[in-house]
Amino acid sequence: MKKVLIPLVLVFALGTGYVADAANSVSKTTNSSFVMQSDLKFISVDVADLPEAVTKAVASDYKDAKISQGFVATTEDGSKVYKVVLQLNGESMTAMYNEDGSKYEPES
């Protein structure tokens, strides 16, 4: 009985450690991506004050959407990122653009 029990306990202990490591790596990845996006401090701006390039990009990307709110943040290199809240088919969604109207892609 002891010969069966000891290997069983070892397999269980090793398996539990592997699962815990996998969960920690997922948690670390999730937290690091959250931190990258939370580094940007957005402040509210009037929709009328959004750059023309951003409003044109929204009109092109989301044909029937209406911009209901606008926000701006300044990155470490001094460029601006715009977050817009859109109303589309009764749903609210957000999109992020660089000041030139290109989609904002956070650095990884």
Image (cartoon, helix red, strand yellow):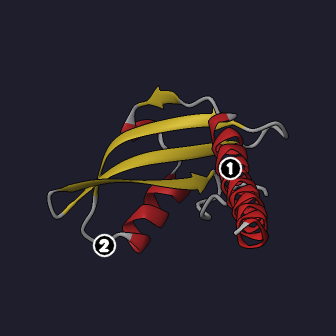
Tell whether 72 sits left or right of 33.
Answer: left
Query: Where, quadrant-wise, is the C terminus in this rendering?
Result: bottom right
| Residue extending farthest right | 77
Going by the numbered disc 2, the residue's amino acid type is Lys
* Badge 2 density bin: few <14, some 14–19, many ≥20, Cα 10 Å: few
Q: Residue at x 16, y 64 (%)?
A: 89
Q: Check disc 1: other Cα within 10 Å, few if <14, some if 14-19, many if 20+.
A: few
Q: Position of residue 99 (x, y in %)?
A: 63, 51
- In the rendered image, residue 14, in percent from the top left (x then y), is placed at 78, 62
Nearer to us: label 1 or label 2: 1
Q: Quadrant of residue 103?
A: bottom right
Residue identifier under label 1: 33
User: Given the current orientation, which residue lies at the most extreme left position?
Assistant: 90
Q: Is residue 19 above or below residue 83?
A: below
Contact, CB < 8 Å: mark 1 with mark 2?
no
Residue toward you, 91 or 67: 91
Secondary structure under the numbered disc 1 in the rendered image:
helix
Image spot of residue 30 (x, y percent): 64, 51
Residue under the point 70% across and 53% down: 20
Name the secondary structure under disc 2. loop
Instruction: Name the quarter where the N terminus is drawn.
Output: bottom right
Q: Residue placed at 58% from the left, 60% from the top?
A: 101
Front-most of residues 26 and 39: 26
> Could you tell me which residue is drawn at 63 percent across and 45 percent down?
81
What type is the residue that disc 1 sits on? Answer: Ser
To which residue does mark 2 refer? Answer: 63
Which of the 4 image quarters holds residue 74? top right
